[in-house]
Image (cartoon, helix red, strand yellow):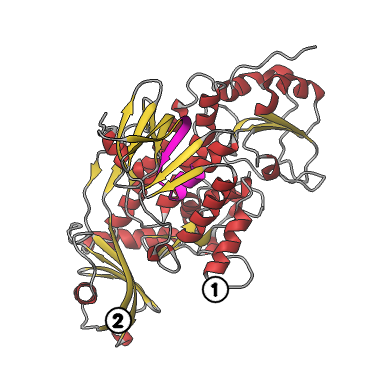
Amino acid sequence: MASVSSVSPVSSRLHDVVIAGAGPVGLFLACELALAGLDVLVLERAEHPEAPLKVPPLGTRGLSVATAEALYRRGLLEDLQAATAAARGAATGAPRKAQAGHFAGIGIDPARIDPSAWPYRLPNPASSNFAADMGSVESVLAARALALGVEIRRGLAVTGLDDGGDGVAVHAGGHSVRAKWLVGCDGGRSAVRKLADFAFPGTEPEFTAYSALVDIADPEKLRPGRNATPAGFYMNEPGRIAIADFDGGAFDRSEAITLAHLQSVLRRVSGTDVTLSSMHLATSFTDRARLATAYRKDRVLLAGDAAHIHSALGGQGLNAGLGDAMNLGWKLAATVHGTAPEGLLDSYHAERHPVGEWVLDWTRAQAAIMRPDAHARALEGIVRDLIDTPDGATYFAGQLWGISLRYDLGDGHTLAGRSAPDVEFDDGSRLAHYLREGTGVLVDFDRCEPLRRAVAPWGDRIRYVAGGAKDPLGLAAMLVRPDGFVAWASDKTPAPGDIEPAATRWFGLPVPVAR
C-alpha cells in the first residue's frame, strides 16, 4: 500500500479507528463507534465544515424512511428536525416533508401507496421520509460525535497509508497517526480507496446535470415542471432549474459554471431563447457509476461514496452511505472489543455490497429513460403508467424509502433481515428507546422466564426487554441487532434453545453465568 515520507506523529497513541472524511457518513460512523466505547479519530481534508452547497435549497436532500429510522433509534431525529427548521429560517415545527419521491422526475402519488403491503410496519416518529440540508445533518452528527469523545481534526487530507497487518499508519498533512482500523468515508474521489488499491469498476457518464438557483428574465418561455426534450431534460421550478445535458459528462468539473455557460446549455436543451438574468449558485454532477468490488481489504474499509458513486437522481447516495455506517459501526466495534463471532465483519460487505449494486442500477435505469430519443420516451410512458397504479406506486415508494430492504440472513421467518417494527409497549415505551445505547435487544412479548435465562450469558451485548405491546404483530419474541434489523423472530413462545444459534451468530460466544 502507498505511503509518504517525512511525516511526524500527531500523537503516539494507537487509536481504535481512524476515519477519513467528516461528512455525514464519516461522522455517523464515528458516533456509532464511540457509542461502543472506541477511541475514534476523524481526519477531514477541508479546513471548515461550512460550504454554500450544504445549505438550503441546493444542499437539501431527501432522507429515506430507513435513514430516519436509523437517526430515530439513536435519538438524533428530533435534533435534526430542529436544526433543519432553523436552517430554513423557521422558528418552530418539523422540517418540510419530502414528496413521496420520484423516478427520473416522475412523481409518486402518495394517495396510491398501499401501506398494507408492508405488514410489519408500525406508525412511529420516523414513518415518513423528509427533507434535510447537508449542513444541518453534519452539524447534528458532529455535535453528537464530539459529545461522545470523538476527535475531529480538519485540514488534514490523507496522503498515504501503511497497513502493517496488526494496524494501519495513516499519513495526512505532514503528520502520521496509528490505528487498529482505517475507514475511508472520504467521498467519490476517495484517497483511501486509491491508496489501498481497491478495484472500482463501473460505467462512464452519459450526461452532465446542473442544479442552479437563478433569476429568469422571461420565465414564460420555459414550461414548468419536468420536461423531456429532443436535446435532453430540464426541470423548472420557481427560482431553480435543473438540466441534464447528454454530453457524455464532458463538462462536469472541467471548469467553473458561469452564467453564460448555464444559459447556453439551458437554451440548447429547452429549445428556447430564454435569458437568465442572474445565477446565484450552481453545481453539477454526472451519472458516472462505480462500485468497489470489496468493501474491506485487510484493516482498511470503505463506506459511502468512497465505496459507490452514481448520479444524484433520486437522492440515494446519502441514504446508502448512512446505511453503510449503521451496518458497519457495531460490527467493527465488536471486532475491536474481541467479542465478534467469526465472519461478523465480513457480513458488512455481504449485506451492503448488494445495496450498492441496487443503487447503481436504480440510478442507471433513471438515466436510461431520460435519454433524448424515442426509445426512452416509450419507456418513460410505460414507467409513468406503472407508477400511477397502486401496485406500482407502492413498489417504487418501498424501494425509494428503504422499506423493501431485507438482508439475506438465512432465517425462515419473514421478518428476519428486515427493519424491526417500532412496537409500543404497554408502559408507553417504544423499541427505539432500547436501541439508543447501540446494543442488541431481545424482545419477549410473552415474558418467558426461560428465555430471559437463556439470553443472560450474553450480558450487556443483548438487552432483555419483556412486556406486552399494543400491537405485537402476532410475534412472541424477536432478537434485534444493534442496527435495528431483526436477527431472529418467533410467532410462538420459543424454547430456551431456540434463541442461542442467532445470539451466537451475531453476538459471539456466551459467557457462562454463575449459578
The amino acid type found where label 1 is placed reads Gly
Residue 311 on the magenta span: no
Kindly identify which numbered label has been placed on residue 38: none
Residue in the foreground of this view, choosing between 280 and 484: 280
Q: Name the residue under label 2.
A: 278
User: Picture quarter containing residue 505?
Assistant: top right
User: Picture quarter containing residue 256?
Assistant: bottom left
Task: Tell me: 125 left or right of 329.
Answer: right
Going from the N terminus, do you reach mark 2 or mark 1 first? Answer: 1
Residue 7 percent coordinates (x, y): 30, 35
Mark 1: few, some, or many residues within 10 Å (few <14, many ≥20)? few
The reply to whether discs 2 and 1 touch (Cβ–Cβ < 8 Å) is: no
**Where, quadrant-wise, is the C terminus in this rendering?**
top right
Task: Tell me: 443 left or right of 246.
Answer: right
Asked if residue 131 can be seen in this view, the reply is: yes
What's the distance in space between the residues labelled 2 and 1, CA to CA? 23 Å
Residue in the foreground of this view, choosing between 275 and 192: 192
Asked if residue 322 can be seen in this view, the reply is: no
Residue 170 percent coordinates (x, y): 35, 34
Q: What residue lies at 46% left-to-right and 39% top-to-bottom?
A: 41
Q: Does 488 sit above or below residue 153?
A: above
Task: Give the structural element (helix, strand or loop) at label 2.
Answer: strand
User: Picture quarter containing residue 234?
Assistant: bottom left
Residue 376 percent coordinates (x, y): 26, 60
Task: Tell me: 176 left or right of 477.
Answer: left
Q: Mark 1 points at which residue?
A: 89
Residue in the foreground of this view, choosing between 303 and 194: 194
Magenta range is: 13-29
Residue in the foreground of this view, choosing between 102 and 505: 505
The amino acid type found where label 2 is placed reads Ser
